[in-house]
Image (cartoon, rainbow, N blue to C red):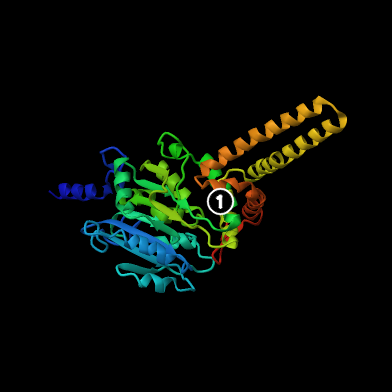
Amino acid sequence: MKRKQESAEVAEDVFKPVLGLSDSPISQPVLRGTVFDQPEPKKLLDLTVIVPARNEEGCLAACLQSLVNQSDEFFKLGCDWELIVVDDHSTDRTAEIARGFAGVTVLEAGVLEPGQSNPVWTGKNNAIWTAARRARGRWLLFTDADTIHEPGKLHRAMHEATRHKVGVLSYSPRQIVSGLWQRSLMPLIFCELALAYPPAKVSDPAERIAAANGQFMLIEREAYRRIGGHAAVSEKVLEDVELAILAKRRKVGLRFRYAEDAVSAHMYRSTAAMIEGWTKNLTLLFDNCLALAVWRVIDILLLTALPVLAVEFWNARIFAHSAQWLIAGWVLALLWVRNLFRFYGRVAKSNFSFLNCAISPLGLPLFIWLLCRSWFQHRIQKRVSWKGREYVA
């Protein structure tokens, strides 16, 4: 009798099937407190939404309003799902704004001591982990404070993940941009991301390539436990991609897609913030930043030099009275047109508007500089900064 009772206790402490896996349980014991440091609630909610926020007074209200508006009689905030904002030691009105929304739980992130180690935590990961350890949802949605969520899309996202039998669903939001530099630079970066991380390959379990967007990551509770939660990527600056890699490695199922129908995001409110953010991320996103920078230099040369040379050849034909110069000029002109189609064909993959794609060549010098700057800070200085904090690269 005692042996049967012990066997029953062990059976309760094994991983249950994660979405997308076989029905047979995984014979790996659950260590209590390895992911969630509280006893499992008797009744789970459908969803926990976690919003880490550090000095986000300019965008947090719009984000929370779009989230609170998801609540209805069939999906009621506080009954069926919960919304947690983690104030990451903001020095502005971030916490005050969050507390102004009924039904929103506001937590304060744990203090990060200078030189804290074993493990080292980034500010965002530490903030998310503060809320994740007490989350009561079957699904956990990690979303940024600069996002706007379309009505009814949280519930549909859970259905989408269930329908595709995945434990991790990540959306790439429609990007909101303002100002010349954002409008010209962002399409260049996002087209490279679309080429480096094709959603179809990312979502294919047979492919090794993995990616996710931390602006919208929906993770099933047991999948999050099996991945190890944000504690498994505590020191990673690019935690979303690292979680996606773990999701594929642990075979919990990963789906990634562009989702302009569900969520939008205004990543950067200023050019300075954009420069700091992409300096932090570009080297981590692309295998060889310097090689990519060289190719973009070639783009500038082809886009500018070919038409100039064509005009010079046409002018030479006028003075030399030779058809050869005329033919050479037209060959160069045709090569320029072909290169123009190739360039804009790539940029169109960014999913930005026609106007933003059209002016994207203006952002090439800034893109090249950011690629080199990111490489230098990561590979030479081995330090990057973000929102008033420095991290070892």
Q: Quadrant of residue 385?
A: bottom right
Q: In front here: 329 or 344?
A: 329
Residue 163 occupies quadrant: top left
Which residue: 22% across, 56% down?
74
Q: Residue furthest left?
A: 1
Place residue 294 in its image quadrant: top right
Q: Where is residue 102 in the image (x, y as percent from the top left)?
A: 30, 70
**Left or right for 176, reference 139:** right
Percent coordinates x, y for residue 135 in the rendering: 31, 60
Rate crowding at label 1 as few (under 14), some (14 to 19) or many (20 or more) other CA atoms within 10 Å: many
> Mark 1 highlights which residue?
186
**Foreground of the two, 95 or 299:** 299
Q: Residue at x 17, y 47 (%)?
A: 3
284 horizontally vs 136: left or right: right
**Is 91 situated above or below 201?**
below
Where does residue 142 sit, x and y in percent of width and height?
39, 56
Total numbered labels placed on residues in the image: 1
**Image quadrant occupied by the C terminus:** bottom right
Residue 68 appears left or right of 148: left
Q: Which residue is drawn at 63% across and 37% down?
A: 340
Residue 194 sits above or below residue 282 on the image: above
Residue 30 appears in the picture as rendered = no
The residue at 54%/43% (across/down) is 191
Nearer the observer, 5 or 25: 25
Please name the amino acid that badge 1 sits on. Answer: Met
